[in-house]
Amino acid sequence: MAEPYIRIRGLTQRFWDNEVLCGIDLDVFRGETLVILGGSGGGKSVLLKHLPGLLQAQSGSIQIDGVEITGLEERKLGPIRKQMGVMFQAGALFDSFTVAENVAFPLRENGVRDEAEIAARVAEALKIVRLPGQEEKFPSDLSGGMRKRVALARAVVGRPACVLYDEPHAGLDPITGDSIDHLIKDLQQDLGMTNVVVTHELRSVFHIADRVAFLDNGRVEWTGTPDELRETTHAGLRAFVAGDSGEPWK
């Protein structure tokens, strides 16, 4: 087995009296799409925010491409963050920025000053997400699906090795969600990007995942392929997939 691109061991996180992550062990391999499943409030988004150092671990180890980032100073996280694009749950676009300005934002933050290069990179990213020629529009001019694609363009404009997706299907109809799934797989297959996807959308799991990790009670309780997910005997995962709360119907 190849060395993991992301290696997490014993990761814990607590907010006041709430222990959200209770010793996460997880590997993500270069070039794969890993989908993280779990109930609401189970720590999936919290886990994701640790990978680019947006949150610092209470304890444990996170290695990105062999570099330990736990406890790393903010200024030393820059090279790690350049390797990772983040597609936030609600898109997190700036309403007062045009599409081009939104997509260009990480380039400018990383010190790119050549306006011709910025324009070319923005156009390339918009073409990747199938929104060519939309640079001058504002987020308010776009549908929910288009805003998600602009957010994805912003995540990939820096040509990262890995993209992190926090609920990319949230608020989308099934057809638009399917278009996002196609983009995720295209990034993996055409550009070799590693994808880590937090989602509740089970249909998408079987479209995009190479492997699946199931979080429950702050721990990774199960990992496997989509085919193994279909056949699993893990009680908690089976209940999650079936949408069964265990409460009797009246």
Image (spheres, rainbow, N blue to C red):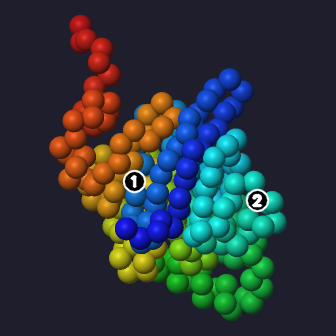
Three-letter amino acid code of the residue under disc 1: Val
Q: Which mark is residue 73?
A: none
Q: Secondary structure at mark 2?
A: loop
Secondary structure of the residue carrying numbered label 1: strand
Q: Quadrant of residue 215 in the image?
A: top left
Which label belongs to residue 35? 1
Q: Which residue is mark 2?
A: 72
For marks 2 and 1, give the CA distance. 26 Å
Q: Amino acid at mark 2?
A: Leu
Q: Is residue 42 left or right of residue 83?
A: left
Quarter of the image with the C terminus is top left
Report the quarter where the N terminus lies.
bottom left
Q: Which residue is at 64% across, 38% downward?
A: 13
Residue 202 % position (x, y): 30, 46
Of the image marks 2 and 1, the number of the one nearer the N terminus: 1
78 displayed left or right of 126: right
Q: Residue at x 27, y 34 (%)?
A: 234
- The quarter of the picture where residue 121 lies is bottom right
Q: Identify the image quadrant of residue 100.
A: bottom right
